[in-house]
Image: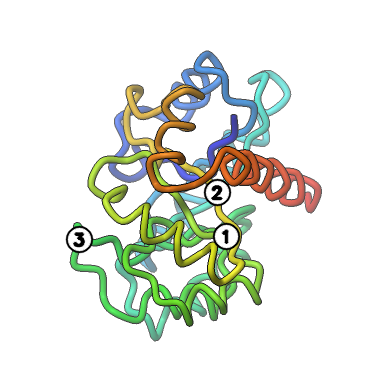
């Protein structure tokens, strides 16, 4: 298992990064991205500190680690430049907090995230066919999430992504130990969203491919 969207005490997670990494390892994860919520006020601070941990702990953790950020509730007009800032600050993966149906995320966030070239568009809610087609064109992965609330639109995301040829990944959006779900629940969430077994396996392969590519850029 691989998870490319998690949170620590650098934002609203319950665990410091070291414990998050350790618990993910024990839960069976092979790779983990720490992607705390970020805007212009904390972006560089969070990335620098998580990089300090991943670079030092990576050889000892028994799990591949990526330092990144989840750009969250940033005005759409500023999202592309914020993605660029995150990469300049050293982010190895950039996630954008998409238009989930359970938060007042500003309309246009999904499109701006895709146009800005983020790696993963998290819980994109009622993403449009046009946005999904652009994600497929630009190589932006769309998220199927195991997190309660955000997962309410998983079925829509799966259907629109299938029609557009957009690629999916499964993430936990983990904020606490209980969120690091095991393989049976990950599969159940995927199948519950309407994915076939083959599509679920493709999601997991997508995560492996993306993680390997990002780790290889170091």
Circle number at residue 103: 3
Whether pointer 2 and pointer 1 mark residues with C-beta atoms closer than 8 Å, the reply is yes
Name the residue that disc number 2 marks: 169
Q: Nearer the viewer, residue 140 or 18?
A: 140
Would you call the spot at circle 1 few (<14 residues within 10 Å), some (14-19), or many (20 or more)?
A: many
Image height of 186 relative to 118, above or below: above
Query: Which residue sits at x=66%, y=48%?
Result: 206
Q: Nearer the viewer, residue 48 or 95?
A: 95
Would you call the spot at circle 3 few (<14 residues within 10 Å), some (14-19), or many (20 or more)?
A: few
**Which residue is the extreme one toward the bottom?**
77
Say whether disc 2 or disc 1 marks the residue closer to the N-terminus. Answer: 1
Circle number at residue 141: 1
Circle number at residue 96: none
Identify the image's colour scheme: rainbow, by chain, secondary structure or one colour.
rainbow
Quarter of the figure with the N terminus: top right
Judged by depth in the image, the label closer to the viewer, 3 or 1, is: 1
Judged by depth in the image, the label closer to the viewer, 2 or 3, is: 2
Query: Which residue sits at x=38%, y=71%?
Result: 127
Image height of 213 relative to 79, above or below: above
Q: Position of residue 72 (x, y in %)?
A: 35, 62
Name the element at disc 3.
Answer: loop
Q: Distance of mark 2 from mark 3, alpha carbons?
A: 21 Å
Image height of 137 relative to 1, above or below: below
Name the element at disc 1.
Answer: strand
């Amino acid at each position: 298992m691989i998870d490319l969207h998690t949170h620590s005490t650098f934002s609203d997670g319950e665990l410091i990064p070291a414990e998050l990494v350790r618990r993910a390892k024990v839960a069976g994860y092979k790779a983990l991205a720490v992607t705390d919520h970020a805007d212009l006020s904390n972006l560089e601070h969070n990335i620098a500190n998580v990089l300090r941990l991943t670079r030092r702990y990576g050889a000892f953790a028994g799990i591949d680690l990526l330092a990144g950020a989840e750009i969250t509730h940033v005005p759409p007009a500023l999202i592309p430049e914020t993605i660029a800032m995150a990469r300049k600050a050293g982010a190895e993966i950039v996630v954008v907090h998409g238009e989930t149906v359970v938060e007042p995320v500003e309309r246009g966030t999904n499109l701006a995230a895709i146009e800005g070239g983020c790696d993963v568009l998290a819980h994109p809610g009622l993403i449009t066919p046009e946005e999904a087609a652009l994600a497929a064109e630009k190589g932006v992965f769309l998220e199927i999430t195991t997190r309660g609330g955000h997962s309410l639109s998983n079925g829509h995301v799966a259907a629109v992504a299938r029609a557009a040829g957009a690629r999916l990944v499964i993430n936990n959006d983990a904020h606490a130990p209980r969120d690091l779900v095991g393989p049976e629940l990950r599969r159940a969430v995927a199948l519950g969203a309407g994915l076939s077994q083959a599509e679920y396996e493709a999601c997991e392969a997508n995560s492996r491919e993306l993680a390997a590519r990002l780790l290889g850029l170091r």
